[in-house]
Image (tube, rainbow, N blue to C red):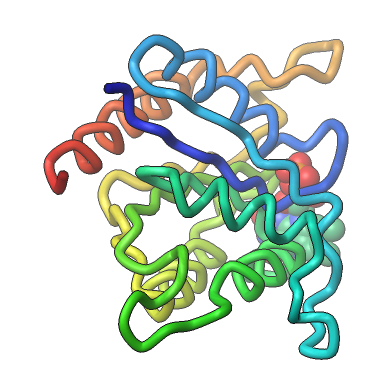
């Protein structure tokens, strides 16, 4: 049986570089694993007043993550941190918490990638994300991670991410994540 990977992109922007990166990963992975990019644009701000029953959009992504074999995060860097929409989504996924079963993120393999037009390559944000994911008890694949700096150098005249120089690193990470998931099954 094919393994199921879901991707969570920490940017809601239509032309998001990180979304485009996730889509390139998706076409590469096709045939090797199922790969679905979750749409988190309808996830409301977390508010304990509306926690039970959880909004439909939350229940939908919770179920997707629950049945997934791994979660691949494509995270932009905002002020040397990951984005608020990503934190908000992870907060929703981290509830409800059971002492016995944890929550849908518990023990779930995680991979992390990010691209930025800037020079930091999203590395600082990724380190913060590792801290958060570890706290949620995800199994983070720390190597390889993918961080792409100067992302616009790999964008063509139409504004499309071509991923010339970095594609082999993305593909290696995809293969590594599939192995990481399979080896712990
Ligand atoms: C940014 N950007 C940015 N880039 C970076 O490399 N380090 C950073 O700390 C920040 N900080 C930051 C803060 C805020 C509020 C915004 C809106 C942007 C630039 C960011 O990398 C760029 O907008 C990317 O294109 C965002 O990712 P998507 O939407 O293309 O996936």
Q: Position of residue 121 (x, y in %)?
A: 55, 49
Q: Position of residue 175 (x, y in %)?
A: 28, 26
Image point (85%, 42%), residue name: 13
* Location of residue 163 (image quadrant): top right
Image point (84%, 31%), residue name: 15
Image point (28%, 32%), residue name: 178
Q: Is residue 5 above or below residue 73?
A: above
**Figure quadrant of the C terminus:** top left
Q: Is residue 122 above or below residue 94?
A: above
* Location of residue 82 (image quadrant): bottom right
**Figure quadrant of the N terminus:** top left
Q: Position of residue 107 (x, y in %)?
A: 30, 64
Image point (48%, 82%), residue name: 97
Ligand 1 in which quarter: bottom right
Q: Residue furthest left?
A: 183
Q: Position of residue 134 (x, y in %)?
A: 36, 74
Left/right placement of residue 129 relative to residue 130 reads: right
């Amino acid at each position: 049986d094919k393994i199921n990977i879901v991707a969570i992109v920490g940017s809601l922007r239509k032309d998001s570089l990180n979304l485009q990166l996730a889509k390139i990963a998706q076409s590469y992975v096709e045939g090797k694993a199922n790969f679905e990019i979750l749409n988190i644009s309808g996830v409301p701000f977390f508010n304990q007043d509306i926690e039970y029953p959880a909004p439909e959009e939350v229940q939908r992504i919770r179920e997707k993550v629950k049945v997934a074999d791994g979660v691949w995060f494509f995270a932009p860097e905002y002020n040397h941190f990951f984005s608020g929409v990503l934190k908000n989504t992870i907060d929703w996924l981290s509830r409800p918490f059971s002492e016995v079963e944890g929550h849908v993120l518990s023990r779930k393999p995680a991979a992390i990638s990010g691209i930025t037009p800037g020079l930091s390559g999203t590395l600082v944000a990724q380190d913060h994300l590792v801290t958060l994911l570890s706290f949620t008890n995800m199994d983070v694949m720390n190597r390889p991670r993918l961080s792409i700096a100067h992302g616009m150098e790999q964008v063509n005249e139409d504004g499309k991410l071509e991923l010339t120089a970095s594609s082999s690193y993305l593909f290696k990470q995809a293969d590594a994540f599939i192995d990481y998931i399979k080896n712990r099954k």
